Amino acid sequence: MSASPAFDAVSLGILWDRLIAITDEGVSTLVRTAFSTVVREGYDLSVVLLDADGALLAQGTQSIPSFTGSAPATLRHMLNRFPPAELRPGDVVVTNDPWMGSGHLYDINVMRPMFRQGRIVAYVLSITHLPDIGGSGFGSEAAELWQEGLRLPVAKLVVAGRRDEFLMELIATNVRVPEQVIGDVLANVACTAVAERQLLDLMAEYGLADLGPLSHQIQAASEAAMRARILAMRPGTWRAELMIEGIDQPIRLACTATLAEGAVALDFAGSQDCVPFGVNVPFCFTNGYAIYAVKCLAGAPIPNNAGATRSIAVTAPAGCILHALPPAATAARHSVGWFIVPLVFRALAAAALDAVPAESGMINMVNFRGTHRDGRAITTLHFASGGCGALRGLDGLPTISTPSSNAGIPVEVWEAETSLTVTEKRLLTDSGGAGAFRGGLGQRLSMRNDTGAALIVDVMGYRTDYPAAGAAGGRAGQARQMLINDRLLPHKGRFVLAPGDRLTRIEAGGGGYGAPGARDPQRLAADVAAGYVSAEAAERDYRAPPAKVRGA
Amino acid sequence: MWRATARAPDGGPQVAWRIGVDIGGTFTDFALLEEASGRVFVHKRLTTPADPAEAVLAGIPMVLAEAGAKATDVGAIVHGTTLVTNAVIERKGALTGMLVTAGFKDVLEIGRELRYDMFDLTQRFPEPLVPRACRAEIGERMRYDGTVATPLDAAEVRAAVLHLVQHERIEALAVCLLHAYANPAHEQAIAALVAAEFPALPVSTSADVWPEMREFERWTTTTVNAYTRPLFDRYLARLEAGLGEIGCAGRLYIMTSSGGVVLPEVARRYPVRLLESGPAAGALMAATLGKRLGVGDLLAFDMGGTTAKGCIIRGHQPLRRYEIEVARLHEFKRGSGLSLKLPVIDMIEIGAGGGGIARSDALGRLRVGPESAGADPGPACYGRGGTRPTLTDANLILGLYDGTRFLGGRMHLDAAAAAAAIHEHVARPLGLTPARAAAGIHEVINEDVARAFRVHAAERGVDYRACTMVAFGGSGPAHAVRIARKLGIPRVVLARGAGVFSALGLLASPLAFAVARSRQLALAGIEEGWWLAHMAPLIAEAAAPLRAAGVAEAEITLRCHLDIRYVGQGHAVEVPVPAHGTGQGGAALRARFEVRYAELYGEPLAGTPATITGLKVEAIGPDPLGGRPFQIVAGDAPTRRPARRLADVDGRGARDCAVYDRRALAPGAVVAGPALIEEAESTCVIGACDRARIDADGNLVVELAAAAEAAA
C-alpha cells in the first residue's frame, strides 16, 4: 500500500460498500425485468464495475464466478474496437463472441461507459445467458463454432442513446424465441443504465472527480489481504489430474499449482487437446474458474476485484481443451470448464488442507425445445443441483448449486412456462458419500412431457462415470443418471421426449469427508431417522451395528 | 369504526381509555390514552421472556395508577409483540406436520438451490420447521391452470393425518399443495376434513395463508404459520384470562406486520402475519405524525440496541411489500433466513444499533456490527463485563451522551472503560487516534444506515431527498440529523415520546385486513366487467373481518393493487388502481402499468403484451385518532444543564456544545446547532448550523443547513 492512502479506513469501507451495492442493484434490475427463466429464476447473470483503466472494481454479490475472470478481458476487446476517445455518453456496446466474452455464444456482454464531466470514469458490464442464440440449439452436439449460432462481433447496440434497430432485428431474426432474447438484451441495457445513475450519484455526493485513487486503494487492500491468505498456505509445487466424461471417450484435465512468496501459479499444461464437440473451453472461462477456486480456498471474504486476483496467475497451452481457439465449438463449455474447480482443489489439497472440501455433485442443466400446450415456443434451460461435498467439520449441503451459482427453477413456474408436469422432486436417500462428515444429498427429479408434442432435450451431464470423490478417507457420492422412461441416457446428447414420456434426473450426491467409521453415532442415527441414510447403508458404509442405529 | 366499537362487552357507553402495549426484545412499552383529552401516559418495563404476558399484566396497573384511571374504564387494548418472530428464531413453536403433494415433501429442504455467498464453502441454511418424518405426501394434483389432474382421496388424507397425530405426535398441520394458488379446492377439502375429524389440530393451508406462485416460499410461509399457531393461541388465552383478572374487560386488538390491527380470532388464524408487528406500529406512527404535520413523504428511522429499521412513507402511507425474511443465520445476510411471502410494511433492517460491536476487518477497514453486545454484557461503558467497543461507547466518548443521565440517571456509564475498549480494538490496530476511532465508529454506522436506505429507496424508485425524516428509538435521535445530511434530506422531526413510539403507534393503528389472489388475465382481452367477476369477491373477503368487528360499510377504505407484467417476464410490477370497476378496461390498465414500469426501469416495452398476474385488496377502518395529537404527560420538573465538550464528530473540530432538557423547551422555542437535547431515553444531536424548533405539538423539528453552509 502507498505511504499515505487517499482514503482512511472509514472512507474506504464506506465507498467500497457503495460500489458493491451499485452492482447488486444492477442484479436486482436484471432479475425483475428479464424475460427468460434462465435469468429471472436461474440467476445466470453477472454485473461488474470496472475503473477507467479497465481494472475490475466491484461485482454483484449474486453473480456467476466465471465472469470475474472474463469481464476485464471482455472490456479490453471492446475498447480495442472502440477506443475510449470514440465512446460517447449513452453508448452501449455488446458482444457474444466466445473468445472476447465468457466462453460461449449464449452469454451476451453488455457494456456502458460512464461519463462524468465529459470523461469516462468507469465502465459497467452486465452479462446474462440468453435463452437462445440460433444455430443447432444449446447442447454439446456441434463440431465447430459455426453450427452453434449467431456470433456478434463487438458492436454498438445503442449509439448516444439511440438503439441500433438493425442490430436488434438481426438478433431477433436469428433466434427461436425473439421476444425472450430481445427482452433479456433490453434488461441488460436497463441494468447498465441503473448502475450508471447510481455511480454518478455517488461520485457527485462525495465530490469524486474520478475513481482512480479509490480503485487503486481498493485493489491494494484486496491484494494485500489475498497475499496474506496465500502466505498462510503451504508453499510448494503440486500436480493434479482429473478424468471426466467426454463425448466419445473420457477427457483428461491436468493442473500444476505452484505456491511461492504469496502468489499462486496455476498451469493447465497436460490437459488434452480440443475435441470436435461443443465442450471446448476458451481461456477466459478457464481463468475465471481457476481464480474462483483459489478465492474459495483462501477463505477470507475479500470482495471481487482486480487486486484480489493479482496474486493468482493462470496459464494454459493454446489449443488444449482449457484454452480452445476458434473455431472450436464451445456451447457446453461449462460441462468441462466447471471441473477446473475440483481440479484446482485437488492440486491445492496439500497446500490448504483443512479448507479443501470433498467433491460436489454440481449443478446440472438440461435444455428443452418445443412448443407449449398453448402454442408458445419453448427454448429454455432447466437447472437442478446435486449435493455439495463435505468439509472438515461440516456435512455437505444437499442440492446446492456448485461451482456455478444458479438457482433451481420453481416447479410451479416451470410447469406454467412449459406445460410439462413435474412428478417428483425429492432428496435422494444414500446419495451423499459416506464419511465422518457426510456428503450432501442429491435429488431425484422427474418430469413428463404433457405439451402434446415432441420435445427436443439436450443433456450435458457429468458425474455419471466419475462420481464426486470423497476427501481424507470419505467415500464418493452417488453418480448422476438421466433417463427417458426406463432408458438410461448417455451423459451428453440430444434426445426426443415424446408426448407422455418422462425424463428423470438423478442428480449426483457430494463426496464424504473423513473415514465413515469416525462419524459421530448420534449424527448417523439422526441421518437414518430422517431417511438421509438407509439402515442398510448405515450398516454397509459406516459398519454401524444395527442396534445402535435403531436407537434414533 | 373501531373507536365506536370500543365499548364494554355489555354494549355500555363509549369508554374513557385505550392502552397500546408493545413487547420488544428488551423492553415492554405502554401508552395509555385518555379518549376525551388526548392525554397520554407512558410506561416502560423490562420484558419477561419466559412469560411475556407477565410484563403486560404487571405494567397495565402501573400506568393506570399513574393516570388515576380504573381498569374497568379501559375500552381497548391494542397489542404488538415479537412473540411470533422469537418463536421462529428460537425454534420454540409446535411440532408441526405437513401434508404435501406426492413427490414434493423435500421442497422445504431442497429450497432454491442457490448459494447466498459465492465464496463461502461453509455457508448454511435454516433447517425446515417441519422435520422430514412429519411430512406426508398425498396423491393429488392440480395443474398450473387450476384444473384437477388427480383428484383428492379423502381416505388417504385421513390415514396420513392419523399417522402424523398418533405416531409423530404433531400439534399443528400445514397443508401445502402444488398450484393451490390457482385452485385451493384440495387444500380446502383437507382443511374441512381435519376440522371435522381432528378438531384439536389447527390447520394452515398455503392458499389461505398467502396464495402466491412459487412453492418454496409459499410453503415455508405456511409452515411458519402452522408452527406458531398453538403457541400464539396459548399466549392469547393467558393474556385474555390475565386481563380479566386485573379487571380489564376491554376489547383486545392485535397488531399485524402490514400496519393494521385485527381481532384475536384473526390473529389466531394467521400468526405469521404478526411478524415484526411492533416496528410496523412505529412506521405507522410516523405516518400519523406526518399527517398531523401535513407532510406526506417521510423516511421513518428507528434505531434501538440491536438493529436499525427504515421505512419509506409516501402520500401518508408506509410502502408495503409481500416478502420478508426471518431468522437469518448469517446475521442480516440476504438469503440466509426463511423466505416468506405475506403482506408487510416494507422495512429495511440493518444490523446497526447502540450495541453494535466495532472491529477492524481482514482488509484493514473499520467495521461496526451486525454483531451486538446486547444487554448482556452490553457495551463496555455499562460496566457489566463487556470489553469490546460498541456504538454506545463511541457516542459516550464523543460527548454525545451524558454518562450520569443515561436512562434518566438510572444507569451510570463508564467513560474510561469505553475509551480502553476503543483503543484496544479499533484505534491501535487501525492506527487511528482515539477521537478519530470513536468518530469513525459513529460515522460508519451513519453511513451503513444511509447506504441501506439509499439502496432501499432506489429499489423502490423513491427520491428520498424530497422526504422528511422521522426518527425514533433509543439511538435514533443521536444519529438522525447526520444521516439525513448524507441523504440530502432537509428536515428531521423528533417526536415527543420517541422512546415509546411503537406503543403510541398501536393507538394510531386502524383495523385492517389484506387478501390476495393469483389470477392470469391478459390485459388486451379485459373488459370493464372483469371487476365484478374478480375484484368484487376479493373486496368482500378483505372487508369481512372489519364488518365482524362492527365497522360500518361507509367507514371502510379500500386499497386495490394489480400485479401486472409483460408476458414472458417472471416478476410483476405492483400497480395501484381505484377501488371501483369504472374506467378500468384493458387500455386504461395498460397505461397505468406503463407509467409505473417507466418509473422503475426506464423505457416501457411498446407492443409487448401484458398480463395481470395477481389481485390484492386491503380493507382499512377509520383512523382511531381522528387526526388529534397526543398530549404526552411529562414526569418531574425539567433541569438546567451545563454545556458539554464535544469531540470532532463532523470534521469541524472539537468544541463546546449547549445541552438542553427537552421538557424545558416550550412550543416556539428555537435552538441553534450545535446542540444536544436530552430526554430520559434518548439524546437528539443537532448539527452545527442546523436549527431546531419546537412546534405546537411539542415535536422537535430540525431544519438542516444547506450542504455548502454546513461544510464551510
Image (spheres, coloured by chain):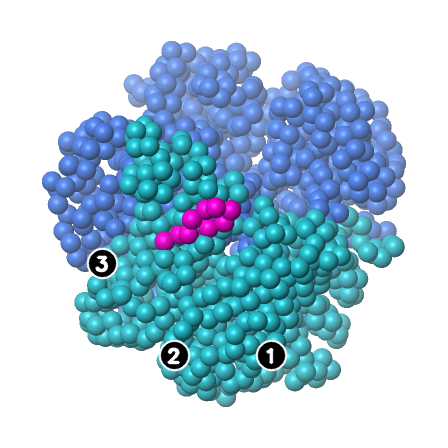
Chain colours: A cyan, B blue
Q: CA distance from mark 1 to mark 2?
A: 23 Å
Residue A229, given in percent of the width and then of the height, sits at: 69, 51
Instruction: Look at label 2 and name its amino acid.
Output: Glu
Check disc 2: other Cα within 10 Å, few if <14, some if 14-19, many if 20+.
many
Chain under callout 3: B
- Of B123 and B351, nearer the camera is B123
Predominant secondary structure in magenta? Answer: loop
Check disc 1: other Cα within 10 Å, few if <14, some if 14-19, many if 20+.
some
Instruction: Look at label 1 and name its amino acid.
Output: Ala
The residue wearing badge 3 is: B143
The residue wearing badge 1 is: A318
Q: Secondary structure at mark 2?
A: loop
Q: CA distance from mark 3 to mark 1?
A: 51 Å
The residue wearing badge 2 is: A141
Residue at image point 28% right, 41% down: A536
* Residue A358 visible here: yes
Tell me the magenta residue range: A470-478
Is A270 on the left or on the right of B673, as rendered? left
Q: CA distance from mark 3 to mark 2?
A: 34 Å
Residue B697 occupies quadrant: top right
Residue A135 occupies quadrant: bottom left
Residue B242, given in percent of the width and then of the height, sits at: 39, 15
